[in-house]
Image: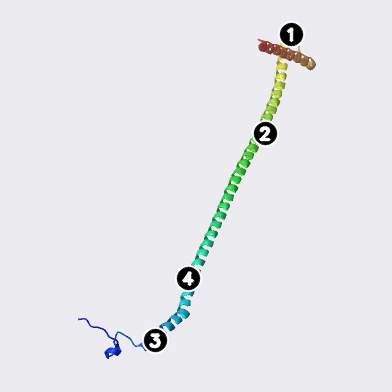
Amino acid sequence: MLTKVLPLSEAGESPSPLMPHTAEIIFGVVFLILLAIAFAKVVVPKFEKAYADRTAAIEGGMNEAKQAQAEAKAALDKYNAQLSEARQEAAKIREDAREQGALIIAEMREQANTEAERIVTHARTQIEAERSQAVASLRSEVGTMATTLAGRIVGESLEDEARQRRTVERFLADLEASESARQAVGTDG
């Protein structure tokens, strides 16, 4: 059963519900064109503007990120430079402190040596003074004893001071000469 579809004018039937009227098609096409024009004039520019704003915001954000990254790198480089300078300055301060410490130690040693030399010189002077005093005391005691002994041996009094002094001087000179001769023989042999 095949049926043939005939145009409306031939069939004499009522219009098909699937097929719209020509006026509706024209009105639909005009409305679609007006809608497309309105869409192109109003909506598309807003979408384009939103897209451009979003693109600008993204690019601005990327530029800001690049700028922030560059600033961070510059700050890091500055920090590293300051750290390097601080390390160099600390090394210089340590070296200066070492040098000052060495100078202080040298000065203290020099002062200690000077003080030691002064003490030794003072001690030698004091020993020499005490030795001179002891020699003088011994000379007078030895002189007195020698004159007393000589007076007993000789049998006459040697109480004359000038004579006593000459006798003591002679005795001590003989004593020193014999001691010098003994030392000379001891060093040669």
Tell me the distance, in whole angstroms, between the alpha carbons under discs 1 and 2: 57 Å
According to the image, label 1 marks what residue? 154
In the rendered structure, which disc, 1 or 4, sits on the residue that comes first in sequence?
Answer: 4
For the residues bearing labels 1 and 2, Cβ distance under 8 angstroms: no
For the residues bearing labels 1 and 4, Cβ distance under 8 angstroms: no
In the rendered structure, which disc, 4 or 2, sits on the residue that comes first in sequence?
Answer: 4
Camera-nearest label, 1 or 2? 2
What amino acid type is highlighted by mark number 4? Answer: Arg
Which of the numbered marks, if any, corresponds to residue 26?
3
Tell me the distance, in whole angstroms, between the alpha carbons under discs 4 and 3: 40 Å
Question: Which residue sits at x=27%, y=89%?
Answer: 11
Q: On the rendered image, what quadrant is the N terminus found in?
A: bottom left
Q: Nearer the viewer, residue 22 or 30?
A: 22
- Crowd band around label 2 with a 10 angstrom C-alpha radius: few (<14), some (14–19), many (20+): few
According to the image, label 2 marks what residue? 114
Q: Where does residue 13 sit, x and y in percent of width and height?
A: 27, 90
